[in-house]
Image (cartoon, rainbow, N blue to C red):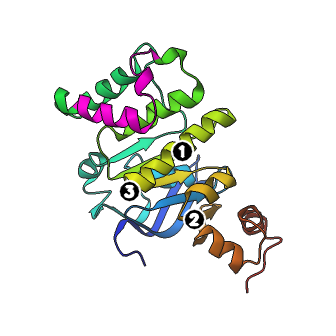
Amino acid sequence: MADDPVIQTEDLTKIFEKGKKREVIALDSVNLEVERGEVFGLLGPNGAGKTTLIRLLVGLLTPTRGKAIVLGKDVTKDINYIRERVALLPQEAGIYERLTARENLVYYGGFYGIPEEELHKRADRLLDLVGLRKKEDYQVKGFSGGMKRKVLVARALIIEPQIIFMDEPTTGIDTLGARIVRNTLKKLSEEEKQTIILTTHDLNEVSELCDRVGILNEGRLVEIGKPQELEEKFKAANLEDVFTGLVTGEGVFRE
């Protein structure tokens, strides 16, 4: 059990209706706790339920049954409280390319009613954090994929969220850009003590960044633990072997 959980789910389930009498169970009775300050990775093949879980936790979807508590509040009853304190960086996040890096942060923060002077103070700190201070007055349309992703990370953080959800944060960017984003996430975890919920297909990214991982398959949470502990538990050479074995049913053995 987590000492200071910021996320708790109990039998969390989401069922979508697909035509007459046809149902798709996207998430099936998930029980999960995430601790404050933890970097938690969600792994699973496409369609496993990762994005559905995140959307439930930020109130973009309503549970079919079960319960989700975020920052001590029920997502079905206190979603406005939760939304003011969490940030979501979706896989296909949009960015205002004609605005500068700083303007993107300030414009977004303005929607939350943050005073302009405070916004610029936060922007100063975040631009330093993600290494874009020297590029703050450049339009982002000329940025690389990695630099744009850094702007998006900083933009999500401008509201000073207690939890940040990131759906495939390095998808679609080159190796150097992915390294830049991972280094930024490391800083957030180590220096800012940020709680990060991360979905990714990059198992090296998971091993490098995540304190714990949860493996989803066909909507069910089939395993949870620290990467090294899972490798030892299943007598696997690496996390990829654990993941592949759990998803396919081959190649892993419990002690």
For residue 125: magenta?
A: yes
Category of crowding for the residue at label 2, using alpha-carbon neighbours closer than 10 angstroms: few (below 14), some (14–19), many (at least 20): many
Quick one: which residue is furthest to the right in this view? 251
Residue 250, placed above or below residue 20:
below
Q: Mark 1 highlights which residue?
A: 183
Nearest to viewer (mark 2 / mark 1): 1
Category of crowding for the residue at label 1, using alpha-carbon neighbours closer than 10 angstroms: few (below 14), some (14–19), many (at least 20): some
Residue 207, placed above or below residue 58:
below
Which circle's residue, 3 or 1, is located before the other in the chain? Answer: 1
Which circle's residue, 2 or 1, is located before the other in the chain? Answer: 1
Residue at 53% x, 28% y is 147
Quick one: which residue is furthest to the bottom in this view? 255
Q: CA distance from mark 3 to mark 2?
A: 20 Å
| Three-letter code, disc 1 | Asn
Can see residue 13?
Answer: yes
User: Looking at the rendered structure, which numbered label has been put on residue 219?
Assistant: none
Category of crowding for the residue at label 3, using alpha-carbon neighbours closer than 10 angstroms: few (below 14), some (14–19), many (at least 20): some
| Three-letter code, disc 3 | Lys
| Three-letter code, disc 2 | Gly
Quick one: which residue is furthest to the front in this view? 134
Which contiguous range is marked in magenta? 119-139
Residue at 52% x, 52% y is 198
Q: Mark 3 highlights which residue?
A: 193
What x and y, as percent, mark residue 114?
Answer: 19, 34
Residue 197, placed above or below residue 222:
above
User: Looking at the rendered structure, which numbered label has been put on residue 214?
Assistant: 2
